[in-house]
Image (spheres, grey):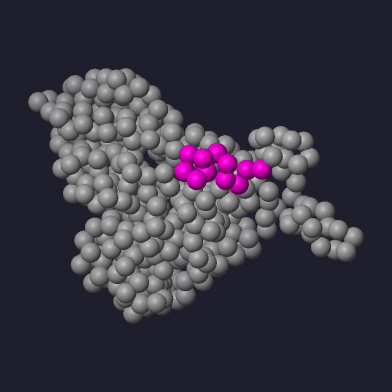
Amino acid sequence: MKIETRAVHAGRHIDPATGAVTSPIHLSTTFERSPEGDYPRGFSYSREDNPNRHALEECLASLEGGNHAICFSSGLAVATALVQGLQPGDHIVAPDDVYWGLRKVIGELFGKSGIETSYVDMTNIDDFHAALRPNTRLVWVETPSNPLMKVTDLTSIAALARLSGPNILTVCDGTFATPVLQQPLDCGIDMVAHSTTKYISGHSDVIGGALIARQENYLFERARKSQRYGGSVPSPFDCWLTLRGIDTLPLRVRAQSENAMQVARFLDQHRAVEKVHYPGLATHPGHKVAARQMSAFGGMLSFQVRGSREAALGVAARCKLFIRATSLGGAHSLVEHRASIEGPATRTPQNLLRLSIGLEHTDDLIADLDQALSTIPA
Ligand SMILES: Cc1ncc(COP(=O)(O)O)c(C=O)c1O
């Protein structure tokens, strides 16, 4: 079935007790055993499994074209679980502009664990190839990337990683693209990671994460143990909210992609804008790859204001409709000065603003940006 249909039906069942069309929220932490001592309905204790989490995992596996999914209490809990599955001496290759939270997980949580990491420009396949080592175990890809919107060729990365050794597993953080626009497992990637906090839940009201695979592998199995025994589980209500959001995921993401395209075109011709980072623009270095591996270019973009950090902060300050807030993927459009949230070690240009394009009318979004940019001197 098509993704719109799976988004509404996968993992959902009419409640046998009441006939309820929308699933109930199962808050119970514990489930009854039979007189023989087993669990005939499949659930024993909510940290191990819960009907709402089970439904969400079934749905996400279906959306990604996978067979297995594990839901976590946040997107970074997915990264933590995967890195935790590695051994001292193992090596990770990750993008040089990876979402800054992954650098914190690797550096601050696992800095003393003996795991080695190389950060490289994954859009350059030669640089990627050169970074692989005999002890490489995990290749982390993020495309499009946060916040520079760099696009990585998933098919080439997956093929090269596979050729380079049987022990290398690949994972793609597909948070910006969602399963609606990009299917990493079809490109040969082993696992897909999501912050479901963003587009998948879609309403800026729940934190969550997910890991999806077509075939189980040892890191996936260890990540499941980290979820169940380590306890980084989402609550039943969080799972229910996320699944409710998924009903409209394909419609939202396509509308946000169309809006973002129009905003990107507007910014691209604006005299106060130095550079627009949006893979939908033909001038973007990753445009051709994005056109091949994505069905639309997504609702995220960033741009550099002509001028300094202060000029960019001034534009954000003058926005009236765009809300100054971090995060992305919800119905409200957001503007964010990434460098100031990422701190002194940031690699993000100081004059860059990131936009998460929401579901408002583009005329209103463009008018807001136009007035916010109007005081930048020509
Ligand atoms: C691309 C990407 N991956 C992962 C995360 C982390 O997700 P969470 O905040 O749900 O832990 C984020 C958060 O902004 C993100 O943008």
For the point 32% across and 30% down, which residue is it?
Answer: 259
Question: Toward the viewer: 114 or 237?
Answer: 237
Q: Is residue 135 magenta?
A: no
| Residue 256 figure quarter | top left
Please, which residue is most extreme toward the left here? 378
Q: Is residue 18 above or below residue 80?
A: above
| Residue 42 figure quarter | bottom right
| Residue 193 figure quarter | bottom left
- Which range is magenta? 1-13
Q: Is residue 71 above or below residue 332?
A: below
Please, which residue is most extreme toward the right here? 35
For the point 35% across and 22% down, which residue is it?
Answer: 361
Q: Do we see residue 331 in this rendering? A: yes
Q: Is residue 80 above or below residue 260?
A: below
Q: Is 322 on the left or on the right of 14, as rendered? A: left
Q: Is 312 on the left or on the right of 193, as rendered? A: left
x and y, in percent, of residue 167 in the image: 41, 76
For the point 35% across and 54% down, which residue is it?
Answer: 142
Q: Do we see residue 150 in this rendering? A: no
For the C terminus, which image quadrant? top left
